[in-house]
Amino acid sequence: MSAKIRMNTEYRNKFYNRIKDVFEKEETQEQQAFLQARESFNHLQKSTFELAKQVVERSYPTEDVDTLRVFKKRYGDPCDVVAKDKCFYFAHNEDVDDEGENKETKSHFDFGLFGNVNGQEYSSEDTEHFAHAYFREELKEKGCNPDIIAQQSGKDSNPHKTKHVDMCNKALGKSGGNDDGIGMTKYFNDSFYADVIGTSYCRSRAIACTKDEYNIFLAWRSAKAKVVTTHQTWINSIMKQCDQLKIGLKAYRYLSEGIELASELGIKVDEAELIKTNSTGLTIYNPTNLANMIKGMKNKEQTREQKIYERMKYEKESVN
């Protein structure tokens, strides 16, 4: 019966979303690279902050912090100079310039969820990209699209992107200004504060560290940036497959073709979820050929011989 049922837009969208969901859950190299990058960052976040706290306490000893708090309690606002912070300028003087003189090397390191990934003091799109990727599963459960920044990479700002970015930020509990935020943002940030002395912004209080310690901070920040780049690569791979899927679906006239495509991709889809398109009937997008093309785009573990075989098989079937 399904061979005589024509597609329509509603069925097409259901079918597309079902297959896209499968693409996102597949254990490809790109997906695993992202998950490993996130796990590596988790490990480094904790150990690197412990080092950062030690460095901070060398400049602002705990006993001095305690004394100043006693003074604040006794004298009030004039002695209100102790605060908790999660971002710091660390600096060392072990590098030399062209004349052999010691020079200061410093950078900004922010341990907050929306902290920078490139050493800049102020937030950029990468900071939101990291936060969305880090809590990707939690945001998906809340009906948000945590992949929106990756999906819109290279495109101008637009209402669609802004809408989904704002939804993600709200779900994470991001707040404006320098406060802690709420919800998941506060949960993340709460473990990464250290006591500092002073009333100025962190730009004016470069904290001394050794070159080796500084390099550890750089490695941690690179691990944070890698969460963003691996997430972008993974989403790019899914989008390439989905682009071909969209084109192919437009060539189908009957549900039977959608059923065959799903079967070739190893996906079970209920007939009610299938889709329709007004097609041109391009041969390259018959269900078997399209499935082979999409499977060939997945960067799963394959030998060189397997990849050559799959490519030759696809080209042969496309001709036929």
Image: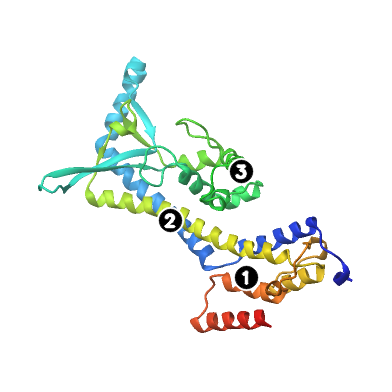
Residue type at mark 1?
Ile
Q: State the count of labels.
A: 3
User: Marks 2 and 1, how far apart in space?
Assistant: 26 Å
- Closer to us: 253 or 57: 253
Quarter of the view holding residue 317: bottom right
Report crowding for label 1: few under 14, some 14 to 19, many 20 or more residues within 10 A (C-alpha).
some
- Tag on residue 164? 3
Reply above or below: 195 against 78.
below
Does 223 sit left or right of 296 as displayed?
A: left
Task: Check contact, mark 2 vs mark 1: CB within 8 A.
Answer: no
Name the residue rendered at 31%, 33% in the picture. 203
Find residue 264 and report its horizontal and vertical position in percent: 70, 75
Disc with the residue nearer the chain's start (2 vs 1):
2
Quarter of the view holding residue 162: top right
Say which quadrant the N terminus sits in: bottom right
Name the residue rendered at 30%, 24% in the picture. 68
Residue annotated with mark 2: 226
User: Marks 1 and 3, how far apart in space?
Assistant: 27 Å
- Closer to us: 71 or 316: 316
Find residue 128 and report its horizontal and vertical position in percent: 50, 44
Residue annotated with mark 1: 294
Report crowding for label 3: few under 14, some 14 to 19, many 20 or more residues within 10 A (C-alpha).
some
- Closer to us: 62 or 282: 282
The colour scheme used here is rainbow
Residue type at mark 2?
Lys
Residue type at mark 3?
His
User: Marks 3 and 2, how far apart in space?
Assistant: 23 Å
Find residue 13 and report its horizontal and vertical position in percent: 74, 57
Disc with the residue nearer the chain's start (1 vs 3):
3
